[in-house]
C-alpha cells in the first residue's frame, strides 16, 4: 500500500507507526514523512518501474531497482552521513519532516551528486579500501605506528562532508520551515550564551523571521 520507507526519529510510537504502514490509509494526517535518497532525490523503497511495483504488491520476495553508482560508492567506503543530517550547524535537531524535505531537496538539486562524482574519480573505492587495509596490516606488525582512522584517511570523508554540508546549507535555506529552523537556532545560541554566564534564558517573545 505504501512501499516507500518513512523518515523517523528513534521514538517508540514513530517506530511502531513505521512498522504498521496500513494505518496511513486510515489516518493520512498522522502518516510519517517519506524517506528520500539525498543523492538523487527519489523515494527510498519505491520502484519507478511499474512491473517491479506490481510484482512487489503480490510477491513475498521483493525486487528493487538497481542501486546508483554514487550510493554504491558510499557503501563501499563505509561513509556515514547521519552526523551531518541529525542536526544543523548550530546543533538544532531536525524533525522527521524536515529531514525528509532536506533529503529530497539535496537530491533534486544535484550539486552534491556532481561533486561526489568528482571525488569518486579522485579516490576510487577499491584503492581507498586497499590503502586502509595495507595501513592497518602495517600497524598490526608495528605497534608503534598510530591507529588508522578511516575518518581521517586521505581526507576522503572530509571532502565528502564538506560537499554535503554545502548542499545541505542551500537546502536548509529553502526549507518550508526555514524561518522556524532559524528561530530555533537563535534560541539555542542565546540559551548556550546565558548558561555560560550561569543564567537561565527564557525566550518568551524572541522571534526571528
Image: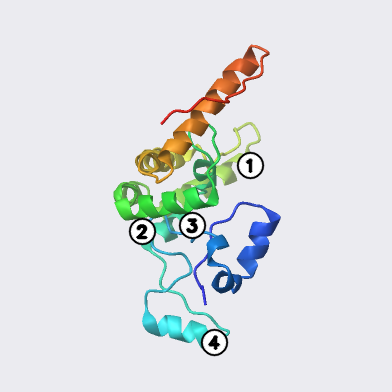
Q: What is the distance, in whole Å, between disc 3 and disc 2 at their CAs?
A: 15 Å
Q: Do the residues labelled 1 and 2 touch (CB within 8 Å)?
A: no
At which x and y percent is residue 14?
64, 58
Mark 2 or mark 3, which is nearer the start of the sequence?
Answer: 2
Q: Which of 33 and 204 is in front in this view?
A: 204
Does residue 76 sit above or below 161 in this rendering?
below
Q: Which of marks 1 and 2 is in front?
A: 2
Horizontal placement of 73 versus 136: left or right?
Answer: left
Q: Mark 2 points at which residue?
A: 40
What residue lies at 63% left-to-right and 41% top-to-bottom?
A: 141
Q: What is the distance, in whole Å, between disc 1 and disc 2 at their CAs?
A: 43 Å
Residue 171: tell me if it is visible.
yes
Q: Which of marks 3 and 1 is in front?
A: 3
Mark 2 or mark 1, which is nearer the start of the sequence?
Answer: 2
Q: Nearer the viewer, residue 61 or 69?
A: 61
Mark 4 or mark 1, which is nearer the start of the sequence?
Answer: 4
Q: Mark 3 points at which residue?
A: 75
Q: Which of marks 3 and 2 is in front?
A: 2
Residue 31 circle label: none
Residue 117: tell me if it is visible.
no
What residue lies at 56% left-to-right and 27% top-to-bottom?
A: 188
Q: Mark 4 points at which residue?
A: 59
Amino acid at each position: 500500500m505504501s512501499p516507500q520507507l518513512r523518515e523517523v526519529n528513534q521514538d517508540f510510537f514513530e517506530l511502531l507507526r513505521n512498522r504498521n504502514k496500513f494505518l496511513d490509509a486510515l489516518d493520512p494526517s498522522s502518516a510519517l514523512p517519506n524517506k528520500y535518497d539525498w543523492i538523487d532525490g527519489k523515494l527510498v523503497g519505491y520502484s519507478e518501474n511499474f512491473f517491479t511495483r506490481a510484482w512487489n504488491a503480490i510477491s513475498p520476495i521483493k525486487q528493487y531497482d538497481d542501486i546508483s553508482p554514487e550510493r554504491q560508492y558510499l557503501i563501499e567506503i563505509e561513509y556515514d552521513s547521519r552526523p551531518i543530517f541529525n542536526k544543523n550547524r548550530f546543533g538544532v535537531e531536525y524533525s522527521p519532516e524536515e529531514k525528509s524535505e532536506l533529503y529530497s531537496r539535496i537530491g533534486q538539486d544535484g550539486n552534491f551528486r556532481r561533486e561526489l562524482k568528482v571525488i569518486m574519480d579522485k579516490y576510487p573505492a577499491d584503492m581507498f579500501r586497499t590503502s586502509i587495509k595495507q595501513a592497518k596490516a602495517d600497524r598490526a606488525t608495528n605497534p608503534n605506528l598510530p591507529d588508522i582512522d578511516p575518518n581521517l584517511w586521505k581526507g576522503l570523508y572530509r571532502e565528502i562532508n564538506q560537499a554535503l554540508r554545502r548542499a545541505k546549507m542551500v537546502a536548509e535555506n529553502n526549507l518550508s520551515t526555514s524561518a522556524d529552523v532559524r528561530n530555533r537556532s537563535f534560541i539555542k545560541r542565546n540559551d548556550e550564551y546565558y548558561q555560560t554566564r550561569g543564567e537561565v534564558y527564557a525566550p518568551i517573545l524572541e522571534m526571528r523571521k
